[in-house]
Amino acid sequence: MTRLTTLGSALAVLGTAHAALNARLVRRPLPGTTTSARISVLIPARDEAATIAACLGSLRAQDVQEILVLDDGSSDGTSTVAAAVGDPRVRVLTGTPPPPGWLGKPHACIQLAAAADPSSDVLVFLDADVRLCPGGIAAAVALLDEHQLDLVSPQPRELAETAGERLVQPLLQWSIRTLLPLRIAERSSHASLAAANGQFIAVRREVYERAGGHRPDAVLDDVALARAVRAAGGRGAVVDGSAVATCRMYDGWAELRDGHGKSLWSAFGSEPGSAAVFALLGLAYVLPPVAAVRGSRVGLLGYAAAVAGRALVARDTGERVWPDSLAHPLSVTLLGWLTLRSHRLHRRGSLRWRGRAV
């Protein structure tokens, strides 16, 4: 046990060191940056009446040519709310049901891309719960030319209100900064290093079409698109979008549980893959604090490193730092439980999201 605690603590220290390095290397859209690219903003929306108006309102201060909203079979009046916003650039489309073999969001996105103005240079896929700062889209798109990229995925600052959200949602930023070598991933063609956040993706239209667009059955449609772009010879990067966008992804525990449940089963490739990942995460971020409670100084060092890494990422991305960072072992444990639950529901064929089977 002492050796395992030492190994876990060493991994936690290395993870924090890597997060600190990524904090220096991560690309950041700079508000105020402009671009000459013609931009189509594409928003897939299913039962988003409560969020779509605020999203479209934040797009008023964006230099884009058009904004397409696809109402994907909503039952709450999403299209009516979107049409009432009054921005002449907004066009509301009525989506068709996904055919066999297609999941809802990829099918909505492929319809949006097909309907976009043919003269657009860049397609920006945006979730309805994202809020943009003025000029945020132009700043993100400018990174494509500045760094010779074909896809950028700015990670918004994640807003978390309830206890469950505060435990789980910060792991989106933390996991990328801690586990992914950002600059290596940016240049690599390996699918395993592809990453993206589907809340906000900007992609060159020519490369999107060459890559074949969104994949029909991709539960993690964002990662699948990033992999397709790489396979087509393009380059992509996850960037820090916390200065240009915010997002409250889920409203409360039940929505968070079901939202992550629909996709976590596919996040690590297989059940053995998930087991291996969480064995390592448990070794690095759960075992040391447990050992620290039993008097282990090495375990205390590992716990301190884990908290420092979580706090470093939270501070850098504008998320809540204290006391949330102190609960990092609980966050990792809860994410493991959500992944286990997702696998169990997937085996039963009972995963559903917004009225559709996954």
Image: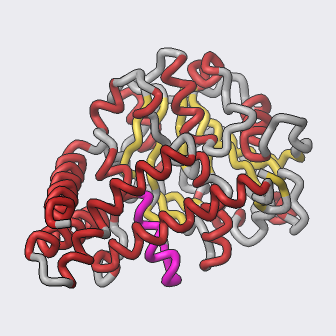
- Pinpoint residue 68: horizontal percent, then vertical percent: 74, 44
Camera-nearest residue between 202 and 297: 297
| Residue 171 belongs to the span the image colors magenta | yes
Residue name at image x 23 percent, y 54 percent:
15
Q: Residue at x 60, y 78 (%)?
A: 253
Q: Nearer the viewer, residue 276 or 94?
A: 276
Q: Quadrant of the N terminus?
A: bottom left
Measuring from the top left, give residue 317's x and y in whole percent.
33, 62
352 w.r.t. 215: above or below? below
Question: Where does the magenta region start and end?
Answer: 160-172
Magenta residues, dominant SS class: helix
Q: Position of residue 134 (x, y in %)?
A: 48, 57
Depth order, front residue of 76/188: 188
| The stretch drawn in magenta includes residue 57 | no
On screen, residue 88 versus residue 74, left or right, reads left
Residue 99 higher or lower than 176, as above or below: above
